[in-house]
Image (spheres, helix red, strand yellow):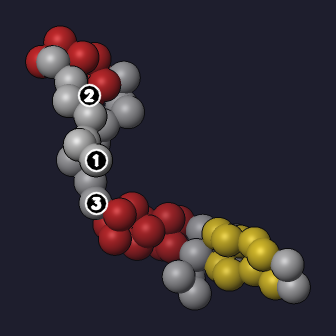
Amino acid sequence: MERPRFDAQREREFVTRGWWRDDTLPRWLARHAGERPDQSAVAFPGGALTWKAL
């Protein structure tokens, strides 16, 4: 499976709209954990995990 390719104009649009950021999943999780550590991040039958737990 190939990853999607976008032309330069589309990439600029994504960045301008804030859809693409210079971020990684671990940094994103850490930021949310710091901002809302005790809120539910993931819910599943029988429980939930907070941002801090992730």
Q: Which residue is mark 3?
A: 24
Q: Which mark is residue 15?
A: 2
User: Callout 3, which amino acid?
Assistant: Thr
**13 to 3, vertically: above or below:** above
User: Callout 2, which amino acid?
Assistant: Val
Nearest to N terminus: mark 3 or mark 1: 1
Nearest to N terminus: mark 1 or mark 2: 1
User: Do tag 1 and tag 2 residues touch (Cβ < 8 Å)?
Assistant: no
Residue 53 falls in image quadrant: bottom right
Q: Nearer the viewer, residue 52 or 10?
A: 10
The local secondary structure at tag 2 comes to helix
Asked if one can make out residue 12 in the rendered structure from this viewpoint, the answer is no
Q: Residue at x 44, y 68 (%)?
A: 29
User: Callout 1, which amino acid?
Assistant: Met
The local secondary structure at tag 3 comes to loop
Q: Residue at x 38, y 33 (%)?
A: 19
Q: Which residue is mark 1?
A: 1
